[in-house]
Amino acid sequence: MTTTPHLRRAARPLEAHLASFGDRVALRAGGRTLSYAELAGRVRDVAHAYAGARRLVLLVPGHDIESVVEYLGALSADQVVLVAGSHADALAQAWDPDVIVASPGRGAGRVFRRDVSAHALHEDLAVLLSTSGTTGSPKLVRLSRDGLLANADAIAQALAIRADDVAATTLPLHYCYGLSVLHSHLLMGAGLLLTDACVLDECFWSEVAAHGVTTIPGVPHTFELLERSGFADRSAPSLRTLTQAGGRMSPERVRAFAELGQRRGFDLFVMYGATEASARMSVLPANLAATAPTSIGLPLPGAHMRIEAPSDDGVGELVFTGPNVMLGYASVPADLALGRTVSELHTGDLARQRRDGLWEIVGRSNRIAKVCGLRLDLDHLERELCARSFVVAAADGGDRLVVGVTDGARPVDVPALLLAATELTGVPAALVDVVVLPDLPRLASGKIDYRALAAPRSNTTTTTTRPRAGVVSPADVTALLATVLARPDAQPTHSFVDLGGDSLSYVEAALRLERLLGELPSGWPAMPAAALADAAGPRRRGSAVETNVVLRALGIFTIVASHAGLFSITGGAHVLLAIVGFNLGRFQLGERPRRERTGAILRGLARVVVPSVLVIGTVAMFSPDITWKQAALITSLTEWAWSEPRWSYWFIEAIVFSTLLLAGLLAVPAVDRASRRWPFAFPVTLTIALAPARFDLFGIPGDHVHRINGMLWLVTLGWAISQARTVPQRLVVSALTLTFAPGFFNVGGPIRPAYLVVGLLALTWLPRVRLPVGVASLVGVLAASSLWIYLLHWRVYPALEVHSPVAAIALSLLVGVAAAEGVRRGAPPLRRLTRRLGNR
């Protein structure tokens, strides 16, 4: 390999390389920043502490500045660093390190166990990593300084890392992929954001925006979480690169993220690697990700790949050569004295080279699985579980670990088995399937059929993803979602959004989940049931209710109370129209194919249209004032002059026509692409484009505050509010609110526009309101029943409003709640009819 100027510069003393970047920011963490010059000084101080001898240092790093400084200082002092994760105690016992540094960022000190090393350490040895990240085979991988630098330089070239890049450390530093992100960015003078936050957390995205993060690395599970968290609709203007390694990601997801990147302006790089190669071996160029999603790309600069003993179709074991190949394995401390024992890496992967020159993995030649970026020795796992009295078969499920066990000899303690499997592997529980069978599947030879074990299970198989003894399991969350959404096919991998949840079912689901789990995390509708169970929050006094739910309850109450004559506070229905757009943006306008997105919008609309037509149609049969036009929801299209009670259902018509218009607009491919590429700017632009209609500049006859032409801006503004993730974006929608809302109403006095302004600003700036538990429950019931209350209150309050407005209000609310509850319980055929029509 030809050494680049960057690599030659880095080959000088480490602190000198760091200092050469001067005041450029190197590390960001917890509100703190450290320039390269400051980093160089702190690394020099740590190196001085290690002066005098070459030792074996066991380091347990966190996502903090102190851990990075300790790691770099030890390397600068020519120590051998064993980077450890959660199994540090076992590693310390097996390898007897001379120095132990546990969690530097948490104040744990550096413990020198001896002044002179107890080990013979080869001069080329620099870093030791577990072969499986945090678990698996007890072997360590021996890595040289030159190999680490060569790989960092090749990665920097392949990904075009720039000095102004900022990478988020979404991966642990004891994992080779996470460590290589650190190496490659420090080599180029780029910045790193050190954070423990998950991509599901809003605080992560706040840090991305605050620090201008350009690069997010991830394993396949990271991308699954991104997909479920609504990443496609999230604005992250600084982002220019996503990198994926740590296992095979489904071609469909590769293609989806690559195409999203083409629309949003970021690149997706799919990579292939292993700890034994100092991290990575190949990169798929970003411009080929959408068209070659099954490929691992091309070898890194200076590296080569070949196929050993290829079959007739060109398939054989992939063998890799390059300067980043490990020195060899270490199984016992005496191996630390060895020099290079490996010159090429036999990967154990079956591969082929395609006609276009790209490389492709087609299978495994041994019993190794790769889940969530961790390489798992399945035979070793079976032996370890057997030692704990679990006789199992472990199989590679692609993106998850499958553990099969029989219940013939004795009952299976599934929670205990799952706990043991997660402890031994480090794989998240949500990615472990424990499959209980009468007998394990076997081949004709009598050997276990691992392929059959890993296949999707039938209904006769008991599969559990995450039982949590005495607390909440994914099965509990899945059952709740299945009940609320009438989806008996719900699985732990499904989220509320996946199962077709919308604004009407959202309130009930949120309240019931909060009772089950405690306080819900932000973005919970996009989280799979298993992840929700894992994220069960603390149970605190009161209940945190989302502002849009509070506004729905307040809106329907003020509508009914104003109609019954208790007081006159109007404007609630117009706030509810903005919430229609807000929830449309959250639930139906996710990153899915155009036709599916249109279908989701129409299915949600059917849940409003079907009960409305049935209720209003029934009223029309007995009331001379309500006609087939109201039942058909076309009053605003056929009658220009306002008249009561025929315009009583204008609000339902506004929901229907605004949703249909947006569905039709988004069905146009070019518009659909624009809305995905600019998820915030698009609805903002649409709202501004509706200004002439809002200000009635066209002179259309009729009451524009009750017609769709005058009110559509409320729905698009609500959509824009749902996409406002940053302070500048919230300021934009606030400015639109303060421009469009005042003066919108020509009757109702100052209270009406004030109600609208306060409601929209609260929806923009106040995510949740903490209420007493009893009040929160009442708010949830009213919000969840708001459609039925609106439809039926017209038939209830008139008989009581003169003599007792309070009784009129109470009875109206009770009748609406009772009707909603009856439908939720599935008693009438209406529920089945609504679902049938909604799924067409």
Image (cartoon, helix red, strand yellow):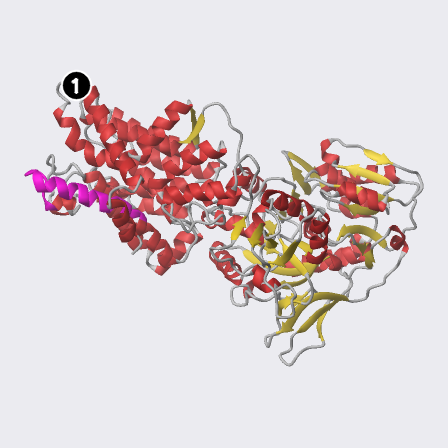
From the viewer's perspective, tell me whether residue 365 is left or right of residue 240.
right
Give SS at disc 1.
loop
Tell me if I can see residue 40 in this picture: no
Which residue is situated farthest in the front direction here?
A: 409
Residue 775 quadrant: top left
Q: Position of residue 78 (x, y in %)?
A: 86, 47
Q: Position of residue 676 (x, y in %)?
A: 42, 53
Which residue is situated farthest in the bottom direction here?
A: 312
> Is 477 colored magenta in this rendering?
no
Above or below: residue 143 compared with residue 445: above
Above or below: residue 62 compared with residue 555: below
The residue indicated by pointer 1 is 804
Residue 64 quadrant: top right
> Is 627 colored magenta in this rendering?
yes
Q: Residue at x 71, y 60 (%)?
A: 154
Residue segment shown in magenta? 604-628
Q: Residue at x 89, y 57 (%)?
A: 338
Tell me if I can see residue 181 in this picture: yes
The main secondary structure of the magenta stretch is helix
Q: Amino acid at mark 1?
A: Ser
Question: Could you say which is closer to the camera, residue 84 or residue 55?
Answer: 84
Q: Position of residue 822 (x, y in %)?
A: 27, 37
Quadrant including the N terminus? bottom right
Residue 598 quadrant: bottom left
Which residue is situated farthest in the top direction here?
A: 803
Q: Position of residue 199 (x, y in %)?
A: 55, 44
Q: Residues within 10 Å of mark 1 (few under 14, many from 20)?
A: some
